[in-house]
Image (cartoon, grey):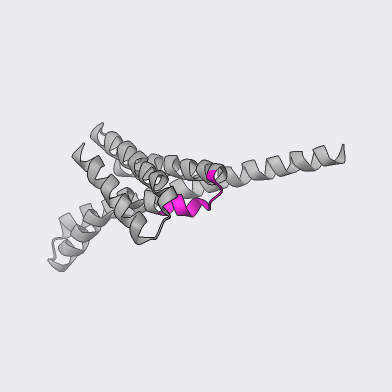
Amino acid sequence: MLEILTCVLGTLGFSVLLKVSRQKLIFTVTGGAISAIISVLMLKSGEGVFKSTFFAMTAICIYSEVLARLIKTPANVILLPSTIPLLPGGSLYYTLSYLVHFDAKKFAYYAKDTLLTGLGIALGAIFVSIIASFIKDITNKFKGCAEEI
């Protein structure tokens, strides 16, 4: 629970830093909570770093795409601060620390963890982007067909 609370506070801090308007702060903080809850619960249930990050990123990408249409704002305004809880800050720090201290085993462990987290973030975003583009193309084709009739 403490992890989720600190992630939400971190999201709030980055939202302020990124100058998100006061009206949209609740949406970015909610996105941060969603990503933190999914990630923490999946990690605690034994799922891997990649899987938990992938599903959390997929969820907040869908959340930001839907919310962008509802509140008429770019999806990135919601998405960027919401990804803060997923960033591999700790594992990246330890990766570089063990690289400098020539500890090959620990370096390899944390490097793998960092790469899997980054890959989960990237593939989650790409997955939702492809699906959203596909849905947009289908709806545009139906709009074109409706106008012809």
Magenta residues, dominant SS class: helix
129 and 21: which is toward the camera: 21
Q: Magenta residues?
A: 71-80
Residue closest to the far front: 22
Corner quadrant of residue 19: bottom left
Number of residue marks:
0
Is 103 in the magenta? Answer: no
Is 75 in the magenta? Answer: yes
Point 68% across, 45% down: residue = 137
120 on left or right of 103: right
Quarter that holds the C terminus: top right
Q: Position of residue 52 (x, y in %)?
A: 34, 40
Residue closest to the far right: 149
| Residue 87 seen anywhere in this rendered image of the structure | no
Point 43% across, 39% down: residue = 59
Residue closest to the far bottom: 100
Q: Position of residue 99 (x, y in %)?
A: 18, 65
13 and 140: which is toward the camera: 13
| Residue 68 seen anywhere in this rendered image of the structure | yes
Corner quadrant of residue 41: top left
Point 48% across, 45% down: residue = 64
